[in-house]
Image (cartoon, helix red, strand yellow):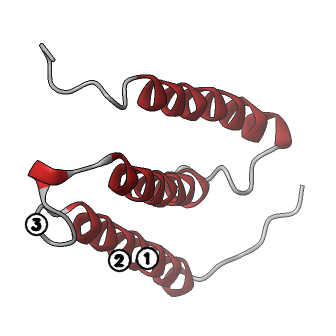
Amino acid sequence: MATTEVSHGESTRRYWIIGAILAVITIVEVIIAWPNLFYSPENVDFGTRLVVVPILLLLSLAKGSMVVMFFMHLKGDARVFKFLFIVPLTIAVSMILIFLTLFSEHVGIAG
């Protein structure tokens, strides 16, 4: 098995770049979800949720994928390990989307 030598500076630089990308995505998520910035929390209708929730889910999926690929080193692993991560992730995301759809009209704990 051949290994590639990477200098310490290049490796550190890559992680700083990935960290900066993750920070930018987090800032975008916070700006989108910030109350009273783009929408009023009291007047959140289904159309607003239909736009905001999928955007936040996609951004979260991108962040999670980057963390798994680079910080958990799944990018260079065997295909079986990628498969063992992607299948449960797909099931979890689909269940979250199903529950969000089923309970989209539910308001609060007792509502």
**Number of the label disc, if any, that sits on residue 24:** 2
What is the three-letter code of the residue carrying label 1?
Ile
Residue matched to label 3 = 36
Q: What residue appears at the point 49 percent right and 86 percent down from the top-left corner? A: 9
Q: Position of residue 98 (x, y in %)?
A: 53, 27
In this image, 29 relative to 91: left or right?
left
Residue matched to label 1 = 21
Q: Residue furthest right?
A: 1
Q: Judge by depth and name the residue closer to the eye, 88 or 20.
A: 88
Q: Do the residues labelled 1 and 2 touch (CB within 8 Å)?
A: yes
What is the three-letter code of the residue carrying label 2?
Val
Q: Position of residue 67 (x, y in %)?
A: 49, 55
* Figure check: 16 above or below 89: below
What is the three-letter code of the residue carrying label 3?
Asn
Q: Position of residue 77 (x, y in %)?
A: 75, 48
* Figure check: 42 above or below 111: below
**Number of the label disc, if any, that sits on residue 32:** none
Q: Distance between the residues labelled 3 and 2?
A: 21 Å
Q: What residue appears at the point 9 percent right and 50 percent down from the top-left corner? A: 42
Q: Judge by depth and name the residue closer to the eye, 31 or 103.
A: 103
**Which picture quadrant has residue 11?**
bottom right
Q: Residues within 10 Å of mark 2 (few under 14, many from 20)?
A: few
Label 3: state its secondary structure. loop
Q: Distance between the residues labelled 1 and 3?
A: 26 Å
Q: Judge by depth and name the residue closer to the eye, 29 or 13.
A: 29
